[in-house]
Every structure is written in structure tokens, then in C-alpha cells.
Image (spheres, rainbow, N blue to C red):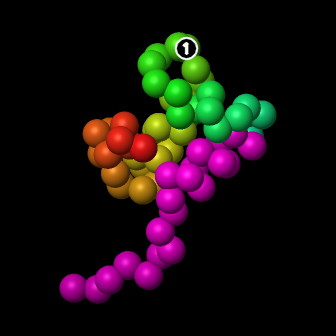
Amino acid sequence: MFLSLKPAISIETVIDAVCSEFGCDVESVIQKGRKNNRARDIAIYLARDVTGKTAVRLGEY
């Protein structure tokens, strides 16, 4: 019944925060494939948790 008044956090915001914390560039996080990339794994986990988007939606990004 009540709408959430929380500001929406975008995928870009999550990726920027992860890159800042891990000292990596955005390209290394958004590249395709699993290459034992901890920053990418953390970004996916946080993006799913914070944005509520599915893995399929995140993959489209």
C-alpha cells in the first residue's frame, strides 16, 4: 500500500563504488566471462541485492 521513498541505486553506482574500493577500472568489471575476477563477483552480488534486478537483467547491462 505504501510506496518506498528510498532513492533508487543504479547499477552504475554499484559498479563505480566497487571499482573505487578495489582500485580497478569499469571495463574490467563489465567484461564478459568468468575470469576469477573478485571485483566483478562483488559488483554482481551487490547489484542484485541493492537494485533488486535479476541476473538476466544485470547481464543485459
Q: How many marks?
A: 1
Indicate the secondary structure of the residue bearing disc 1: loop
Percent across and percent down for residue 32 are 46, 24
Answer with left or right where residue 4 lies relative to residue 19.
left
Residue 57 point in image, percent of width and height: 32, 45
Q: Is residue 42 above or below residue 51?
A: above
The answer, for residue 30, to whether it is visible in the render is yes
In the rendered image, the residue lying farthest to the top is: 35
Query: Residue at horizontal 34%, vertical 51%?
Result: 53
User: Where, by quadrant of the figure, is residue 2 drawn?
Assistant: bottom left
Residue position for label 1: 36
The answer to if 15 sits in the magenta stretch is yes
47 sits left or right of 26 in the view: left
Residue ID at (50%, 52%) = 11
Q: Residue furthest right?
A: 23
- Picture quarter containing residue 19? top right
Quarter of the rendering occupied by the N terminus: bottom left
Write down the quadrant of residue 61 in the picture. top left
Residue at 50% x, 59% y is 10
Residue sitting farthest toward the bottom: 2
Q: Is residue 54 above or below residue 34?
A: below
Is residue 12 rendered magenta in the image?
Answer: yes
Amino acid, disc 1: Asn
* 4 to 9, vertically: above or below: below
Counting from the top left corner in percent of width and height, residue 52 is at 36, 54
Q: Badge 1 local density, few (<14 within 10 Å), some, or many (20+)?
A: few
At 50% from the left and 74% from the top, the residue drawn is: 7
Q: Who is closer to the viewer here, 51 or 32?
A: 32
Q: Is residue 29 left or right of residue 53?
A: right
| Residue 39 can be seen in this image | no
In magenta, the rendered stretch is 1-20
